[in-house]
Amino acid sequence: MNNNKYFYTINGEKVIFDNYKEYTKGNCGYLYKKDNTILKIYTTSCKYNYYVTKKMFNLLKELNIPNIVTLYDYYYYNNAPLFNHIIPPDAYTMKYIRDDNIDITKVSRDYLLETVNALEKTCIELSKNKILIGDAHHGNIIFNSNGVTLVDIDSYFTNNILTFKRIQLHNKKKILYFFKSKIEHDYPTGKENTICYKINNIISNLYKNDSSLTYEFSKILTKNNLTDSI
């Protein structure tokens, strides 16, 4: 990225992003960082297939739900306000979240249950607003000493037909898939298959009795952490 990359707001205001440094690359875009701000620029191939809609971006920004990354604004390559109102954005900015590379299979029982409880509350707020979590990929959730944050909102969507209960079931399952993906990809210990099997059992219990994620995790955490509980 050059030192003076510029974009336009939806209303045509030019914004220059000085000295943003390449941070990482995802499946559908490049992330650049400066201080505590992340700039995400979509790749051309993904812009029209895998992107956050302006409606969803503005909704999540307005709701400012805990444990979902803080969103700032979205941008376009072209200064064409009338055209930009009907096409997806080319880029957007959000708050930088520090990744402490925490091994969630070995964190304390208290930390894990507090994290699950926080995400369960996030699910409730999303579901109240008819928002469904999209891609539950290990790279889209960050754990650090401050807690947990969902950082990729590109595939979130709304559904005004499904009931709150159905949406809540979907979102709770996605939270569990985040944990499975994180464990399988980041922390292979030889016990990850057994841990993920137990998480699959939690998913099955959600279908049976719509139980609490925190309660279900507490049942498998018989010792101080996931690894020792196997």
Image (spheres, rainbow, N blue to C red):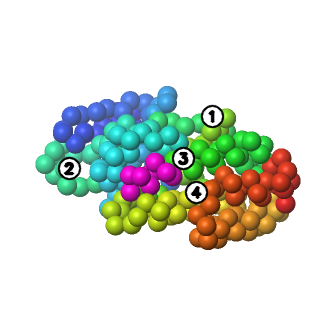
| Place of residue 142 in the rendered image (x, y in percent of width and height, measured from the top left) | 60, 45
Q: Amino acid at mark 2?
A: Asn
Q: Is residue 110 left or right of residue 73?
A: right
Which disc, if any, is residue 146? 1
Badge nearest the viewer, 3 or 2 = 3
Span shown in magenta = 123-130
Kindly identify which residue carries mark 2.
Answer: 84
Kindly identify which residue carries mark 3.
Answer: 121
User: Is there a contact, CB below 8 Å, between mark 1 and mark 3?
Assistant: no
Looking at the image, tell me whether mark 2 or mark 4 is earlier in sequence order: 2
User: Is there a contact, CB below 8 Å, between mark 2 and mark 4?
Assistant: no
Q: Is residue 228 left or right of residue 188?
A: right
Badge nearest the viewer, 1 or 2 = 1
**Residue that appears at 53% across and 42% down:** 67
Marks 3 and 2 sit apart, C-alpha to C-alpha, by: 35 Å
Marks 4 and 3 sit apart, C-alpha to C-alpha, by: 11 Å
